[in-house]
Amino acid sequence: MFEELYDRLGIAALDRAVPASAGVEFLRPVNPATGKPMPVVRAISAEEYEAMADRSVAAFREWRMVPPPRRGEVVRRIGEALRAKKADLGLLITLETGKIRTEGEGEVQEMIDMADFAVGLSRQLHGLTIASERPRHRMMEQWHPLGPVGIITAFNFPAAVWAWNAMIAAVCGDTMIWKPSPRTPLTALAVQKIVDEVVRSVDLPCEGVFQLAPADEAIGRRMLEDRRLPLISATGSCRLGRVVGEVVGRRLGRSLLELGGNNAIVIAPSADLELAIRATVFAAVGTAGQRCTSARRLIVHESIHDQVLDRLTAAYQRVRIGDPWEDGVLMGPLIGEGSIAAMRAALDAAIAQGGEIVFGGNRLDRPGFFVEPALVKADPSMPIVGEETFAPILHVMKYRTIDEAIAIQNAVEQGLTSAIFTSDLREAEQFLSPEGSDCGIANVNIGTSGAEIGGAFGGEKSTGGGREAGSDSWKLYMRRQTCTINHGRDLPLAQGVQFDLDS
Ligand code: NAD
């Protein structure tokens, strides 16, 4: 049905191109809307990974010496190539992940935005000049390329997360090896083909800068232990983050962790409910609840709790579920059978812990992995409310005072995004203050998901503390060097220390 698309992206019938010899393994993505197999992708072997890492080190030696604005030119061309393929790549993302068409294309737009941002950044990798306490001395900070970066990505943003890292890493002078999710290797391969074409067309030493390692966890594990990769940027579950933190920490490498979220929206009595309901439905149901920023908890003032629940139920009834590539569909499938089981288990746990399902939660009777989004009346004390179930479940809870709302919002182990809907300036400012939300992202009168790339993205606590994309996140991809230059004829020591051989 989508053969022409696969052909245009150069990813059709890949299994036929490779002899089925012993030891060759394939990743087998499935279209979650149909349950049918998509073209397979050959996984790399451990030996191939070793050669790839050596190539990455060799490429780094040259790439680090290319002036950053010239590196930006390669990224600019990648952005142009992505613009040309936006519709095709967006549709492929839709087919492989089940996210709706506008979100698939939105993901490619995010990659383009990252490329544009990084091009500008390539002329702004600036350090500070610092006043020295010693006469005729100057201190400065400069930023140098770090080395080959290992990028490990999750299934739900199969291309954008790579761009958050790769576009920045490339202008910073780093090379990279990308291990995508084994559930979305086709999107990764299509992106790599687009990048390879750019690399072949430019007259700069960028061969080996961008490499793809389609593989499962075993190669990922090898990357974590690999001292040739000074930085591992890992996006995925908190479970993954604990392994990365431990293994990379053992070799004292640097890790950038973008992990799970359990995001909440607070709706205060003064909220514009029209906005609040729309934002909540997008945050909780959009991408079938499979965003790290999906809203999983709704904390509603007791005076409007029943009204909000009624309006949400009415809105949920109007959400069109279906093939994600069709116009008008707002919710596609979950990624696989395991996600359906996890959703069922979470709903059963909610009921056992005293919750009540007020809407949805059933599997749809059709091929693929479709469910109804679920609304659950809950209490903050229920253990299941503290967990990230990667499915469209929204736990709705009551609060009495703003202090209580903030305490409930902060009472989970994850700390990615948060939002408050209020027209009360004091409440909004309290939510953003040091005694407010403890998350990496805090919003007023917009929902928890759909961040722009200009701001640093990431979260606190078990979300891992990493920051990617905009602002000054680039600093993590570089090594900082403090330099002191003496242009005088004396050698004064800092802190007034005397060390005179003639005294
Ligand atoms: P996952 O943790 O199962 O897998 C993520 C990646 O890690 C995959 O490429 C996987 O192969 C790899 N991996 C798993 N175990 C590994 C190991 N031991 N060593 C090396 N690599 C290993 O996550 P998922 O199911 O693909 O994605 C969903 C999760 O990702 C959710 O928890 C979601 O919140 C999170 N996520 C976070 C962000 C963010 O920016 N904070 C963005 C997207 C997704």
Image (spheres, grey):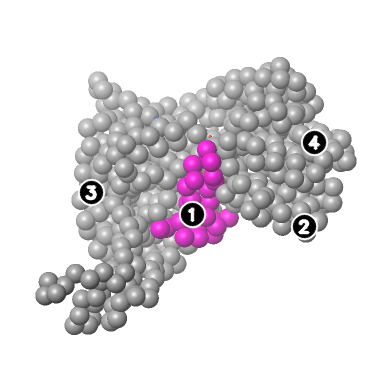
Question: Mark 2 vs mark 3: which is more N-terminal?
Answer: 3
Question: Mark 4 vs mark 1: which is more N-terminal?
Answer: 4
Q: Foreground residue, 488 or 230?
A: 488
Quadrant of the image for the C terminus?
bottom left
The label shown at residue 426 is 2
Hey, which quadrant is residue 408 in on the image?
Answer: top right
Image x and y of residue 320, in percent: 73, 35
Query: Residue drawn 66% across and 55% down?
Result: 433
Magenta residues, as a range?
452-475
- Comparing marks 1 and 2, which lies closer to the viewer? 2
Q: Amino acid at mark 2?
A: Arg
The label shown at residue 398 is 4
Question: Mark 3 vs mark 4: which is more N-terminal?
Answer: 3
Q: Is residue 40 above or below residue 455?
A: above
Report whether the residue tagged 4 is closer than 8 Å to ligand 1: no
Q: Foreground residue, 397 or 237?
A: 397
Q: Is residue 158 left or right of residue 105?
A: left
SS at mark 2 in the image: helix
User: Are the residues at dot 4 and dot 1 in contact (C-beta closer than 8 Å)?
Assistant: no
